[in-house]
Image (cartoon, helix red, strand yellow):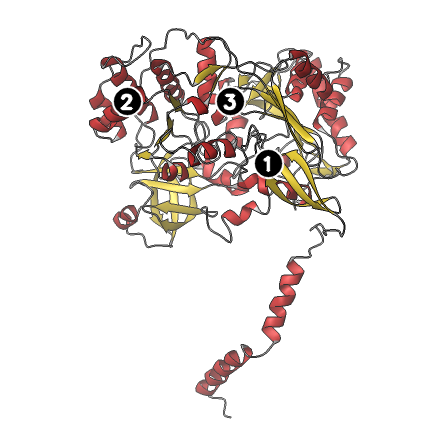
């Protein structure tokens, strides 16, 4: 055969066709499949007896009950617990993969000191030294606790009691927002009894996609029939919007105007059960700001008043962050105006401690920050946290994983991963009844790795302070109450408090003034981060959960921006093309997807795991819900 170009192409085509009929590529694929399932860090499943252990998921603050199916004592799969008082026989995607966390590729078994690996006891000694120096210099020390209400939280508060000027902090969480404002107005803890509600309106909050204990609200939704209606107001057609009985598509950033528009109707039409200064906010103004028809707002207000008890829930999104203060106050005020019986007083746990919201702390005031290892599943951009720190501030992190935040801390003390140590679980902060229990470990923790109570006790000892307590103290305090009931499942149990029979009396409602939204010249679009609970949290996702946005594409993938086809057409952008998203704060490369559920003029950018920081940076360093934006072809 002569070496002409035609003969070479023919030979190449024949060779390619012949390869498909040989066993070589298929054998290679088989070998690769076997190799990738037998990496050295993947735990081998032992041979042995098949058993079931019972515990609770601690990947967020929902406290869902789990049963772990094991072989030779090694968990290989998790399932929900039927009848569990918090999770009601349901689990979220995070919980199904929680048993994989002890073997995560980012698992941290050594300490970190200024980025260098050190022995765990060396890292803890360095943390004690930082805390002792801060005490002697009378600098402000803060603890950031993502899951307040535990006995460990009380231990942190006691530790801070021996440090002048210290502050106990909690980050934003959807479950605490509306209930927290109502608690402040009533002067006592308040919560929601969702079972009593006949109409539930969520505004800008994924009520049916990871709010509270996932199984509880989904069970209520699945069995609702004509007993309860779910209404949802949000700019985009989220999972909650798709499941709700009615989706009310408001403009981005108009949550406060929508709530005040409803309040104005209730006051003017004599439907309010409490005096309020909102009658002057006109229906026409609410329609102008929200993009809704006036009769739509009118109809929703009358449905809330006529189909009670009604609940109105805010709180924001686990990824795109909390709602502005005026929106949360407007949403809380609707519950007072409606006089809902589903808003109930709540007995606090005997060891609960008051906390300061992180966003209320003045910028540049914290000299030493201790970040707890617990996660509430919500995003907290590092830029927002850094604003609160003073110059040359030091960060001590308790972490089980090597994350971006851990790498940037001054000291990282390695602690037990989920399923490795006895941990506390509590009910979501919005629940009308408090709950407390212990999650037994499913596997042994590595040698040298601490539990969080051990770290707190060692910090107190190193600073010559009294012992801050123990988890046993919480159990004794619960038993001393002499009320509530205990649900036992296998070798685990959870205590649920009894209903508080008192009445909530609210102070005079505040006057709320709205400002015109600020517009940036040359940025005609609105960029909104999107994701789901746990997607951009302080701990990495379980490997099983990453399938949601990798193999299955059930959720948007990394660097993916979704826009309405009309928006892309107006900008001259092609489907599945590369583009650059720009805001006044920066720019980032994205891949475009057309999605008719995204409102025109909105760019919905997926944010999860380490890649989330790139998305949050586009929204500035004070609020990460949205930003004015533009798209251009890359």
Q: Secondary structure at mark 3?
A: loop
Task: Give the residue number, with chain letter if any, for mark 2.
Answer: 301
Find the distance from the CA under tag 2 to the CA under tag 1.
38 Å
Task: Give the residue number, with chain letter if any, for mark 1.
Answer: 81
Residue 445 falls in image quadrant: top right
Tell me residue 569's x, y (percent): 27, 50
Residue found 69% across the figure and 19% down from its top: 475
Q: Earlier in the sequence, mark 1 or mark 3?
A: 1
The answer to which of 537 and 339 lies nearer the viewer is 339
Find the distance from the CA under tag 1 to the CA under tag 3.
19 Å
Q: Is residue 153 visible?
A: yes
Find the distance from the CA under tag 3 to the CA under tag 2.
25 Å
Task: Give the residue number, with chain letter if any, for mark 3.
Answer: 431
Number of other residues with Cα within 10 Å of mark 1, as a class: few under 14, some 14 to 19, many 20 or more:
many
The answer to which of 231 and 154 lies nearer the viewer is 231
Residue found 23% across the figure and 26% down from its top: 287
């Amino acid at each position: 055969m002569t070496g002409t170009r035609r003969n070479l192409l023919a030979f190449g085509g024949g060779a390619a066709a012949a390869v498909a009929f040989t066993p070589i590529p298929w054998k290679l694929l088989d070998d690769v499949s076997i190799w990738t399932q037998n990496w050295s860090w993947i735990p081998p499943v032992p041979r042995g007896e098949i058993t079931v252990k019972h515990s609770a998921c601690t990947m967020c603050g929902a406290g869902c009950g789990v049963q772990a199916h094991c072989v030779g004592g090694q968990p290989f799969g998790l399932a929900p617990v039927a009848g569990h008082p918090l999770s009601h026989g349901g689990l979220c995607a995070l919980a199904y993969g929680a048993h994989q966390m002890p073997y995560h590729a980012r698992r941290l078994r050594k300490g970190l000191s200024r980025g260098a690996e050190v022995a765990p006891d060396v890292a803890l000694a360095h943390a004690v030294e930082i805390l002792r120096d801060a005490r002697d210099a009378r600098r402000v020390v803060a603890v950031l606790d993502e899951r307040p209400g535990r006995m460990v939280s009380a231990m942190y508060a006691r530790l801070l009691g021996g440090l002048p000027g210290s502050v106990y902090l909690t980050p934003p969480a959807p479950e605490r927002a509306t209930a927290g404002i109502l608690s402040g107005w009533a002067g006592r803890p308040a919560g929601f009894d969702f079972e009593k509600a006949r109409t539930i309106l969520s505004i800008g909050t994924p009520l049916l996609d990871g709010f509270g204990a996932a199984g509880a609200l989904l069970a209520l939704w699945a069995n609702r029939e004509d007993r309860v209606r779910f209404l949802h107001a949000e700019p985009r057609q989220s999972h909650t919007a798709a499941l709700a009985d009615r989706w009310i598509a408001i403009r981005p950033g108009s949550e406060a105007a929508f709530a005040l528009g409803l309040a104005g109707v209730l006051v003017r039409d004599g439907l309010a059960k409490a005096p309020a200064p909102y009658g002057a906010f006109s229906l026409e103004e609410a329609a102008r700001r929200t993009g809704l028809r006036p009769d739509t707002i009118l109809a929703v207000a009358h449905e809330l008043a006529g189909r009670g008890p009604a609940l109105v829930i805010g709180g924001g999104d686990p990824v795109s962050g909390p709602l502005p203060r005026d929106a949360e106050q407007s949403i809380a005020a609707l519950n007072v105006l409606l006089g809902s019986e589903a808003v109930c007083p709540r007995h606090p746990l005997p060891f609960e401690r008051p906390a300061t919201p992180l966003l209320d702390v003045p910028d540049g005031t914290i000299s030493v920050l201790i970040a707890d290892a617990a996660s509430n599943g919500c995003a907290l951009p590092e830029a927002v946290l850094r604003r609160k720190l003073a110059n040359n501030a030091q960060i001590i992190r308790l972490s089980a994983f090597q994350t971006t935040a851990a790498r940037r801390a001054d000291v990282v003390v390695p602690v037990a991963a989920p399923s490795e140590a006895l941990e506390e679980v509590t009910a979501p902060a919005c629940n009308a009844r408090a709950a407390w229990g212990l999650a037994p470990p499913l596997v042994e923790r590595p040698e040298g790795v601490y539990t969080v109570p051990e770290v707190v006790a060692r910090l107190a000892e190193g600073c010559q302070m009294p012992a801050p307590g123990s988890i046993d103290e919480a159990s004794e305090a619960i038993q001393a109450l002499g009320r509530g009931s205990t649900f036992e499942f296998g070798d685990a149990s959870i205590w649920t408090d009894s209903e508080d029979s008192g009445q909530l009396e609210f102070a005079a409602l505040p006057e709320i003034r709205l400002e015109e939204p600020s517009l940036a010249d040359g940025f005609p679009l609105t960029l909104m981060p999107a994701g789901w609970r746990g997607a951009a949290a302080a701990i990495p996702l379980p490997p099983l959960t990453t399938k949601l946005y990798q193999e299955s594409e059930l959720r948007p993938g990394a660097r993916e921006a979704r826009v309405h086809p009309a928006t892309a057409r107006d900008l001259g952008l092609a489907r599945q093309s590369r583009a650059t998203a720009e805001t006044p704060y920066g720019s980032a490369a994205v891949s475009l997807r057309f999605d008719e559920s995204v409102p025109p003029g909105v760019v919905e950018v997926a944010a999860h795991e380490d890649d989330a920081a790139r998305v949050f940076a586009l929204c500035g360093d004070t609020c990460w819900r949205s930003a004015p934006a533009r798209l251009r072809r890359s």
